[in-house]
């Protein structure tokens, strides 16, 4: 059975009806917004949150603001290219999932060929941008992150294994290296620690959302952990990753990279995270399902957590 044949009939009629008008005949403003949507701006916000504060830590103060701007623009272009290519590859399963049913390729706002050209163009432009305006180490790291996300995660892991988000999340860790290398043209142990923080943060950040929309993933045949495992198993994995994440986040202090402010914020924010993670596990063990499981509480807190942690990283050098 093809992807189109497995869609609900009403969804097919709606999608076909929307595609009767070619992308070129859509209003210009809507077309522009469609291309912007291909870059997944909300996800890129999180990537920039982990890039800029690391630049402050690497500089031990305020980095060159033009360098910060160049790094942010390059990061947006690179991540935007990766996200566009991800949408090109995943356009079949995006059409099956309620959460992604309004993406530009599904609605026909942007054609697959336009998306592919757009994504590849951003990949090339971002690499050259980093090389010329930042440095070539950052350019190489940026390109590596893009290729890892597109090839390793999207093409190889996502549809084959429940470990997809674990190892695929490496791409989302790379902005830490990029931010550090933009300032120092090198990579340090501080950057490695923060890389590992994001590595262990990604699964317990994403699995609660996957629990909420697991029917979507099941319909599309994507083996996210909540699709193939019971809530108790998923919650236990969330707790394990959470403890490791919090422990790793605190190692910046004994390694001498931060003063008193960062570990204080990391301990308080991490403690609250663990409270939420264990709360989710307790509800899962009790057999709670549906809205009462409250899995999205941890998902929303995870965004707040990483924001607080990296703001603390930026502020800490000024309080030492």
Image: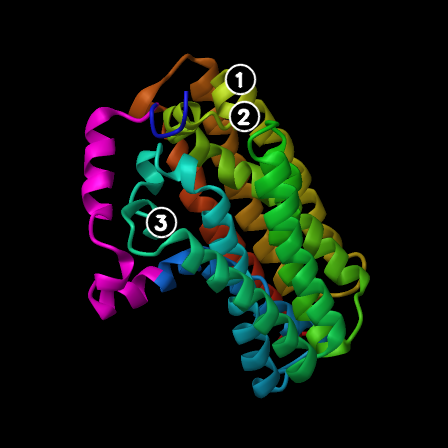
Tell me if residue 239 comes above or below residue 120 in the rendering: above
Q: How crowded is mark 3: few (under 14 residues within 10 Å), some or many (20 or more)?
A: many
State the CA–CA distance, disc 3 to disc 2: 26 Å
Residue linked to disc 2: 225
Name the element at disc 3: helix
The residue stretch that appears in magenta: 6-34
Q: Residues within 10 Å of mark 2 (few under 14, many from 20)?
A: many
Judge whether residue 24 is colored magenta.
Answer: yes
Residue linked to disc 3: 105
Judge whether residue 159 is colored magenta.
Answer: no
Residue 263 in sight in this render: no
Residue linked to disc 1: 229
From the image, state whether disc 3 or disc 1 is nearer to you. Answer: 3
Residue 134 in the image: x percent, y percent?
A: 67, 80
Identify the mark nearer the N-term, 3 or 2: 3
Front in this rendered view, residue 14 or 147 = 14
Residue 256 in sight in this render: yes
Q: Residue at x 41, y 52 (%)?
A: 112
| Disc 2 and disc 1 in contact, CB within 8 angstroms | yes
Residue 288 in the image: x percent, y percent?
A: 37, 16
State the CA–CA distance, disc 3 to disc 1: 31 Å
């Amino acid at each position: 059975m093809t992807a189109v044949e497995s869609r609900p009939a009403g969804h097919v009629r709606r999608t076909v009806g929307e595609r009767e008008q070619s992308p070129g005949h859509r209003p210009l403003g809507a077309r522009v917004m469609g291309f912007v949507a291909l870059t997944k701006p909300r996800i890129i916000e999180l990537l920039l949150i982990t890039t800029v504060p690391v630049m402050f830590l690497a500089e031990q103060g305020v980095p060159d603001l033009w360098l910060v701007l160049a790094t942010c623009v390059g990061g947006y272009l690179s991540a935007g290219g990766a996200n566009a290519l991800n949408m090109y590859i995943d356009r079949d399963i995006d059409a099956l999932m309620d959460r992604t049913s309004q993406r530009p390729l599904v609605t026909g706002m942007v054609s697959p060929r336009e998306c592919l050209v757009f994504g590849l163009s951003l990949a090339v432009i971002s690499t050259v941008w980093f090389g010329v305006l930042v440095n070539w180490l950052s350019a190489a790291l940026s390109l590596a992150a893009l290729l890892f996300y597109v090839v390793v995660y999207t093409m190889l892991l996502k549809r084959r294994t429940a470990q997809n988000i674990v190892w695929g999340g490496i791409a989302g860790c790379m902005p830490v290296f990029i931010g550090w290398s933009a300032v120092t043209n090198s990579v340090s142990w501080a950057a490695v620690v923060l890389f590992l923080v994001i590595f262990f943060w990604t699964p317990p950040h994403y699995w609660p959302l996957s629990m909420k929309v697991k029917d979507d993933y099941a319909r599309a045949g994507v083996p996210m952990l909540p699709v193939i495992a019971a809530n108790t198993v998923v919650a236990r994995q969330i707790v394990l990753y959470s403890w490791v994440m919090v422990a790793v986040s605190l190692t910046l202090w004994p390694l001498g990279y931060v003063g008193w402010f960062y570990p204080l914020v990391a301990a308080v924010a991490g403690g609250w995270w663990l409270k939420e993670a264990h709360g989710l596990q307790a509800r899962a063990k009790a057999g709670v399902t549906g809205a009462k499981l409250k899995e999205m509480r941890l998902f929303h807190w995870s965004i707040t957590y990483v924001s607080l942690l990296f703001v603390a990283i930026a502020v800490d050098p000024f309080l030492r």
